[in-house]
Amino acid sequence: MIGRASEIGAIASREVKKWYRSPILLFMTTIQPLLWMSLYGKAFNLTGLFRIPEDILKQLPPESTARFAAIANEILSRFFGASDIDFFSYIAVGMMGVILLFTSMSSGMSVAWDRRLGILNKLLVAPISRSSIILGKVISAIIRGVTQSLLVMLIGLALGMRLRVSGPVEFLIAVLSLALLGASLSSLIISVTIRLKSWEHHIAVSNLLNLPLMFTSSALYPVALMPEWLRTIAAINPLTHGIEVLREVLLLGTPFNSQTMLWHLSILIIFTSAATFLGIYLANVALRKM
Amino acid sequence: MNAIEAHGLRKVFGEIVAVDNISFAVEKGEIFGFLGPNGAGKTTTINMLTTLLKPTAGSARVWGYDIVDEPERVREVIGLAPQELTVDDELTGYENMMLHAALYHVPKEEARVRVKEILEFLELERFANKKVESYSGGMKKRLEIGCALIHEPKVLFLDEPTLGLDVQTRAAIWNYIRSLVREKGVTIFMTTHYMDEADNLCNRVAIIDYGRVKAIDTPSRLKSTIGGDLIELEVSEINGLTSEKLRTLPGVIDVVLDGERALVKVVRGEEVLPSVISILIRDGVSVRRVEMKKPSLEEVFLSLTGRKLRDENGAREEIARRSIAIRRARS
């Protein structure tokens, strides 16, 4: 058991060392979510549509503005969870989830690099469990992803993101859901890419997966706004559930015993376990080669 | 028990027979070399012996453990320095070694001691804390070998240990390999396509071509199969009587006179040459120049396979194709 832990630790720490020594890599994988949240989140102010501009407010009789405000608040609460939510904060939390997708993608890619450079063979001739190789990659994806996600949060706060957290337990739940997202997405990506032999294929696959996974999740807009068919896809996308947990505990100030939050968290946990076992199983088959 | 025993090993990739019914044994403490051109099946054999590939047929034992039934046991007793450089450029030499130590479950304290010792042995201690990207090719190769030594393996597999290195660096690597065997008692299985490397370094050599073993023996005995050494002399005139005396010397196979040139074909030229000279001097023949040509493994390869190791003509293209196909199937 200690042996397994040290194998996994060794493989993970190699990845993590390479990551924090390469500020370019850190910068490049952080910049994209930042662009999304600062451009899309600030410019396309979805929630702003429901604010009554001052000049209209002056022209209308108070009872009709009150009625409109009630309807607008009702709509905002239904789609965004609270009437006083701002779209930038909404998107920023979404991006905290999306960045785990991006960093997990590069972890999956590192398997292809290791294969191409012959490093994978070195790992395979060592007396270690095949699953340790995969778990090492998954752990490094979690460490990288969670750190970068919290970094995005800090930048978001500097840019005017508003958080409402009930307490430290809720914040820990946010970190937990980020870690689960990292584990599920990186396992999933390793499962898909483990048999690919060239990194060109990996780039093709990651381009194919990155945007669709982001757009079919609730990262950019509420699930409730989506048509029925897209809602079904969003429901099986782990990113949706991770991001929903984040929004509940970080934006809406939901306490840890809330039904909705626990529902999303449970699905995420089930999904993560399934994806991790699938990743380990497929990796064992693919790496055995015997 | 031998360090490695292979019986009828065979590996087929699709239509290509990469390794065809190979059998051999490597004794403990020897340097055993697989000599052959690219695409001959050398790396495929290493991959099977190091449990990376499952043989299509046949069996092999490394340090007594079956490569198919007990791969975990095999992995514990072997080290591999592959053809590609696999040390991590972005980590320091020390970190690379410690990574391998963790992969082989060497306890941290023990690992620190061993890493220091191995880095000193390979004369890399000054560069221990420098990133590997700043290393020269020879230093990277040494580190690669060092990483494969961290768990004190019984059998070390070296795939083309001096590929792409300059002459001095190659000689230095040979010295490290020799002292590994001498000081640490490691058994070495290596592949090479360099004649001089097989000749200088290996106790025994298997000549391999198109996946088959053509011959296995010590380099000197392999060379003696093609008819011994040639002593070439430039002399004043030799009469028939003197040449008859030379012919009856023990070790002399043939004497050919060609004007002022005498060609004496012998076995173990070093031992025969003094007697040849003294007979010539006693008979009043003045010797202007002596040259001794020893047959190289190149000629052995030629006589066994009918072509040169680095063939210039048509066979080359076919070998390249075969080599690419094997590499593709393997990865």
Image (tube, rainbow, N blue to C red):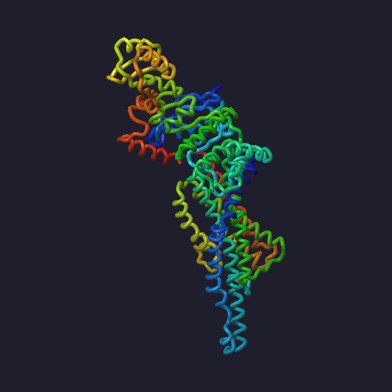
Q: On screen, B265 above or below B47?
A: above
Task: State the residue in front, B182 or A46.
Answer: B182
Query: Residue sitting at 64 percent across and 39 percent down?
Result: B116
Task: State the residue in front, A254 or B263.
Answer: B263
Task: State the residue in front, A23 or B41.
Answer: A23
Q: On screen, B76 above or below A24?
A: above
For this view, does A93 lie left or right of residue B255? right
Task: State the residue in front, A217 or B27.
Answer: B27
Rendered-image quadrant of the C terminus of chain B: top left
Q: On screen, B267 above or below B312?
A: above
Query: Residue sitting at 38 percent across and 17 percent down?
Result: B266
Query: Residue sitting at 44 percent across and 24 percent down?
Result: B219
* Residue A113 in picture, x, y percent from top left: 50, 48
* Residue A68 in picture, x, y percent from top left: 59, 81
* Residue A66 in picture, x, y percent from top left: 62, 83
Query: Residue sitting at 58 percent across and 88 percent down?
Result: A60
For this view, does B315 lie left or right of residue A88? left
